[in-house]
Image (cartoon, grey):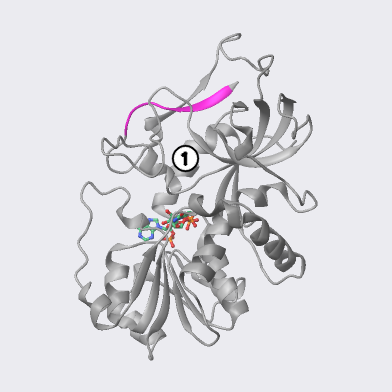
């Protein structure tokens, strides 16, 4: 059983050297369900690389919303897996599931209640790491429940070509909003306009003045900001929000590798413009999954949602792919194909 383990706690930007691919010695790992247990042994097919995993690579003495990884132990992530042995009455050999699993070939899941059955195996299974998995639900819940959009509103999405951003933009278009995306390369900007139907997009790395870029794209201001990056972008956005605007604080990836977070200079705008800024952690809202899944599957089948993923082959590529998120190397949803069936 090959697995990716954390070598040491990370400070600053993670490197490939912070992780290690290890091969468990024969007999060191039990590849069976212990008699009498309700655990499930799965074969992992696709593993997701997500920005929040960076937080788990550091030690949080004062706690975090998600458990820290432990040096020497296997990393965990959302994945799509096939059941190979089961002690659980609701799961049987051959079932396809998605949920939290190990960054390894086979995982013994001791809390199989946390797994979701894959209801639409006619769609690519990898979609359950993205558009039909955690990032998809994040886009859907964050946009509809946190942002409370109305037809005709002006929407900005940052990290717009990524797993969450590409979906937020398209859901906003379906809702009848005007949507602008920011992304870190011309290739991504093109994708936003040509593939995902954003009304406008810009490469934030090429803009001298983010405030001016936002004024150019939103002469009348921004109603909804779907926040994925934080830092300088948030500061510029605050200056361009309209009265009673909403900011869905989904993530702030520009801050994840900093020893000290950047300050926000324009926070007073929240008061003056009566802005509602609300953070959310999608793990609190998995109860909304069923409704989301059916709606999203409908959109995909009707061709209303396009989806781009960035698939690397082989478990050994997971560290490189995970690190790539923090350098913008992924184009679309980053995932790792460990096995095809
Ligand atoms: P993406 O697929 O968007 O990948 C990350 C992207 O972030 C990169 O491709 C890069 O795109 C951009 N990025 C990296 N570093 C920076 C930086 N310093 N400044 C600006 N942009 C940067 O990831 P996801 O869609 O999976 O996640 C998007 C956001 O949503 C993250 O902040 C994540 O933590 C958050 N999230 C929150 C959840 C919640 O429950 N609240 C759940 C899931 C995700 P580019 O080339 O455009 O710079």
Question: Would you say 292 lies left or right of 7 here?
Answer: right
Residue 242: x %, y % from top left: 35, 85
> Foreground: 214 or 316?
214
Question: Would you say 58 lies left or right of 146 here?
Answer: left
The quarter of the picture showing ligand 1: bottom left
Q: Where does the N terminus fall, quadrant-wise?
A: top right
> Foreground: 188 or 274?
274
Residue range of the region highlighted in magenta in the rendering: 2-9
The image shows residue 126, relative to residue 250, as above or below, that is above
- Residue 332 visible, this orientation: no
The image shows residue 176, relative to residue 3, as above or below, that is below
Residue 263: x %, y % from top left: 19, 62
Residue 329: x %, y % from top left: 46, 53
The image shows residue 221, relative to residue 147, as above or below, that is below
Magenta segment includes 7: yes
- Residue 312 visible, this orientation: yes
Secondary structure character of the magenta stretch overall: strand
Question: Would you say 197 lies left or right of 122 here?
Answer: left
Q: Residues within 10 Å of mark 1 (few under 14, many from 20)?
A: some
Residue 194: x %, y % from top left: 60, 74
Residue drawn at point x = 49 percent, y = 54 percent: 282
Mark 1: secondary structure: helix
Quadrant in which residue 225 is drawn:
bottom left
Residue drawn at point x = 56 percent, y = 54 percent: 333
Q: Where does the C terminus fall, quadrant-wise?
A: top right
Magenta segment includes 56: no
Residue drawn at point x = 52 percent, y = 83 percent: 150
Quadrant in which residue 102 is drawn:
top right
Q: Which residue is mark 1?
A: 320
């Amino acid at each position: 059983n090959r697995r990716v383990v954390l070598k040491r706690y990370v400070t600053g930007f993670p490197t490939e050297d912070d992780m290690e691919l290890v091969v468990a010695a024969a007999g060191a790992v039990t590849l069976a369900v212990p008699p009498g247990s309700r655990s499930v042994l799965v074969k992992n097919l696709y593993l997701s690389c997500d920005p929040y995993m960076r937080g788990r690579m550091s030690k949080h003495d004062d706690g975090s919303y998600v458990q820290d990884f432990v040096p020497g132990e296997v990393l965990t992530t959302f994945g799509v897996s096939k059941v190979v042995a089961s002690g659980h009455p609701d799961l049987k050999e051959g079932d396809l599931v998605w949920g939290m699993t190990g960054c390894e070939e086979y995982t013994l899941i001791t809390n199989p209640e946390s797994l979701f059955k894959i209801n639409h195996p006619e769609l690519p299974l990898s979609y359950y790491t993205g558009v039909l998995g955690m990032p998809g639900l994040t886009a859907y819940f964050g946009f509809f429940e946190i942002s409370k959009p109305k037809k005709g509103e002006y929407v900005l999405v940052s990290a717009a070509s990524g797993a969450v951003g590409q979906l937020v933009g398209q859901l906003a278009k379906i809702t009848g909003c005007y949507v602008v995306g920011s992304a870190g390369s011309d290739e991504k900007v093109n994708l936003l306009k040509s593939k995902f139907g954003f009304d406008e997009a810009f490469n934030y790395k090429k803009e001298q003045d983010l405030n001016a870029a936002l004024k150019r794209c939103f002469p009348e201001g921004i109603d909804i900001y779907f926040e994925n990056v934080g830092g300088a972008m948030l500061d510029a956005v605050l200056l361009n929000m309209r009265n009673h605007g909403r900011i869905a604080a989904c993530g702030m990836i520009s801050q994840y590798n900093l020893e000290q977070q950047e300050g926000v200079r324009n926070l007073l705008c929240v008061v003056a413009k009566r802005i509602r800024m609300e953070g959310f952690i999608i793990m609190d809202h998995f109860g909304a999954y069923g409704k989301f899944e059916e709606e999203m599957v409908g959109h995909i089948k009707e061709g209303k949602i396009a989806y781009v993923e960035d698939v690397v082959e082989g478990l050994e590529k997971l560290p490189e792919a995970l690190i790539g998120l923090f350098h913008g190397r992924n184009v679309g949803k980053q995932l790792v194909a460990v096995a095809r069936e």
